[in-house]
Image (cartoon, rainbow, N blue to C red):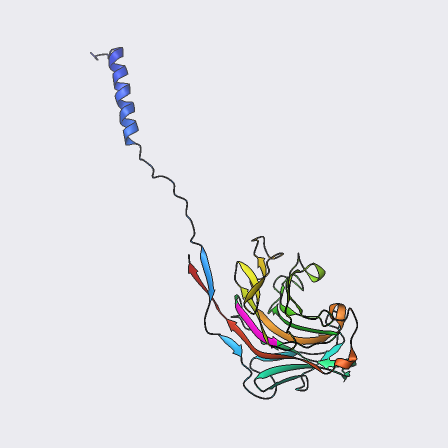
């Protein structure tokens, strides 16, 4: 005959089983969030792409090409851009871009817009140009950058970086700007630096571009900062390769606000060198 357990025995057995069950549960380690190390961005000490202009004649065809024509270039500019060495010439260790008062391509002025050939390596890095600017009302010289491929759409959606712009009617005030879908034209993000000797001396115009920001420096002084807000290409289309443009425009929506002084011609922007240094990355 089966022996029945009394109530105290049953209670004790349940307690023992519960205690054993608790002891058998595995213990979990404390949660530790994964923290990605912060990146430190720098730049190589030697330029990976450069033109020191230590030769004579037309700009080096392995490095430069031209934008040509007299369409107004979206700004109602007055010049016709040519490929002539009368407008873009390398001599005495510098590139000289000259604007002239002459009939050219159906326009009353000639000039040049020299463009670095598309280079896939020019995504992030240090971009540096040493130049002396032309004087006179109506001039509009620029050292700037555009994307190789318009991945986010036509201007301004794919971005523009203006390392240096100057308009002759506002002498000595030099501008660094970026354009994108949110900020462009008269609403562009811009900083201005007054440099008293832009016409008589060479100055260094520089852009430091990383995944975090675009910073502008004039003679190694920080003058401009635009930070990646991580909200996508509308505000940060600056994650594709860009290339250099060097030009002297005449007149236009900005350069021609106070007309053109025809007594100033010919006028020229002189460029001592153009250099690109690759970005480096390390963990903080």
In the depicted view, which residue is nearer to us: 189 or 265?
265
Magenta segment main secondary structure:
strand
Residue 118 seen by the camera:
no
Q: Is residue 239 above or below residue 3?
A: below
Q: Position of residue 210 (x, y in %)?
A: 52, 62
Q: Which residues are magenta?
A: 126-131
* Residue in the image at 26% along x and 15% along y: 10
**How many callouts does the rendering have?**
0
In the depicted view, which residue is nearer to us: 27 or 93?
93
> In this image, 74 relative to 57: left or right?
right
Q: Position of residue 115 (x, y in %)?
A: 62, 76
**Magenta segment: does it hold 198?**
no
In the depicted view, which residue is nearer to us: 150 or 167?
167
Is the N terminus in the top left, top right, bottom left or bottom right quadrant?
top left
> In this image, 10 relative to 227: left or right?
left
Residue 244 seen by the camera:
yes
Q: Quadrant of residue 187?
A: bottom right
* Residue in the image at 28% along x and 15% along y: 11
List the single residue furthest toward the bottom.
Answer: 56
Q: Quadrant of residue 24?
A: top left
Q: Position of residue 190 (x, y in %)?
A: 65, 61
Q: Is residue 16 above or below residue 235?
A: above
Q: Position of residue 51 (x, y in %)?
A: 54, 79
Q: Is residue 198 above or below residue 230?
A: below
* Residue in the image at 25% along x and 19% along y: 13
List the single residue furthest toward the front.
Answer: 196
Is the C terminus in the top left, top right, bottom left or bottom right quadrant?
bottom left
Q: Quadrant of residue 233?
A: bottom right
């Amino acid at each position: 005959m089966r022996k029945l357990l009394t109530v105290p025995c049953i209670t004790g057995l349940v307690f023992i089983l519960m205690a054993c069950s608790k002891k058998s549960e595995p213990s979990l380690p404390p949660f530790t969030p994964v923290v990605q190390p912060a990146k430190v961005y720098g730049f190589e000490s030697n330029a990976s792409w450069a033109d020191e202009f230590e030769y004579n004649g037309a700009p080096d065809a392995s490095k430069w090409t031209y934008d040509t024509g007299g369409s107004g270039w979206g700004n109602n500019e007055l010049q016709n851009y040519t490929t002539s060495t009368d407008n873009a010439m390398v001599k005495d260790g510098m590139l000289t871009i000259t604007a002239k008062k002459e009939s050219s391509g159906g326009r009353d002025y000639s000039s040049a817009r020299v463009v670095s050939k598309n280079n896939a390596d020019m995504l992030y890095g240090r971009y540096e140009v040493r130049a002396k600017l032309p004087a006179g009302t109506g001039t509009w010289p620029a050292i700037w950058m555009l994307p190789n491929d318009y991945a986010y759409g036509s201007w301004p959606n794919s971005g523009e970086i203006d390392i240096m712009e100057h308009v002759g009617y506002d002498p000595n005030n030099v501008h660094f700007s970026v354009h994108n879908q949110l900020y462009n034209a008269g609403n562009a993000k811009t900083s201005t630096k007054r440099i008293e000797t832009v016409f008589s001396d060479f100055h260094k115009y520089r852009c430091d571009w990383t995944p975090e920001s675009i910073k502008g420096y004039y003679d190694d002084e920080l003058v401009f900062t635009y930070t990646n807000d991580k909200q996508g290409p509308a505000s940060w289309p600056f994650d594709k390769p860009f290339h250099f443009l060097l030009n002297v425009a005449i007149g236009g929506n900005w350069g021609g606000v106070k007309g053109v002084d025809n007594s100033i011609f010919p006028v020229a922007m002189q460029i001592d060198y153009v250099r690109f240094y690759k970005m480096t990355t390390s963990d903080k």
